[in-house]
Image (cartoon, helix red, strand yellow):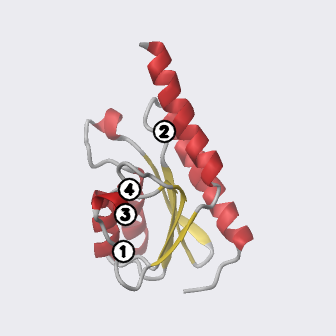
Amino acid sequence: MKETTPETDLMYMRQAIREAMKAYDMDEVPVGAVVVANDQIIARGHNLTERLHDVTAHAEMQAITAASNALGAKYLPDCTLYVTLEPCSMCAGALFWSQIGRIVYGASDAKRGYQTMGGQFHPKTLITHGIEADVCGDLLSEFFRSKRTRK
């Protein structure tokens, strides 16, 4: 895997945030993801659980599937996933099986994140967290605040 810089991580995380905004605009929990290989975005995803009536339609799952289709491969060791929220244990399991090379996430999820729920990634997967964490967390907070005030 190619080395990345903090500037590169920031650039791709901002693309994941754009995906999260698409989810927000669709009244979905605003989580977005992009998969990068060879310095190019090969896949994008955002939450679609409400629209698809599918609890597994998380941003990461959408992005993993799109990346696998783009590469024609089920394993993603030379790819990096940028996602706005710490993956849940379901997504951690899928990422484990994909053997993704690196995961970069923004906001931590103390209630349902993989660390709290006991999920794990492939032993060779590198993890970076906290990139644009405030922006990612604020988007989620605003979404849920707006849900509470509408009721």
Compare residues 98 and 145 and report the one nearer the observer.
145
For label 1, the residue is 72
For the C terminus, the image quarter is top left
The amino acid type of the residue labelled 3 equals: Gln
Q: CA distance from mark 2 to mark 4?
A: 19 Å
Q: Which mark is residue 115?
A: 3
The amino acid type of the residue labelled 4 equals: Gly
Label 1: state its secondary structure. loop
Q: Earlier in the sequence, mark 1 or mark 4?
A: 1
Q: CA distance from mark 1 to mark 4?
A: 29 Å
Label 4: state its secondary structure. loop
CA neighbours of label 2 inside 10 A, class few (<14), some (14 to 19), many (20+)? many
Q: Position of residue 32 (x, y in %)?
A: 50, 50
For label 2, the residue is 23
For label 4, the residue is 113
Q: Earlier in the sequence, mark 3 or mark 2?
A: 2
Q: Is 18 on the left-hand or right-hand side of 57?
A: right
Q: CA distance from mark 3 to mark 1?
A: 30 Å
Question: Answer yes or no: do the residues labelled 3 and 4 have beta carbons within 8 Å?
Answer: yes
Residue plotted at (35% across, 56% down): 88
Q: CA distance from mark 3 to mark 2?
A: 24 Å
Residue plotted at (37% across, 63% down): 115
* Residue 118 quadrant: bottom left
Judge depth for marks 1 and 4 and give the one in front: 4
CA neighbours of label 3 inside 10 A, class few (<14), some (14 to 19), many (20+)? some
Q: Earlier in the sequence, mark 3 or mark 1?
A: 1
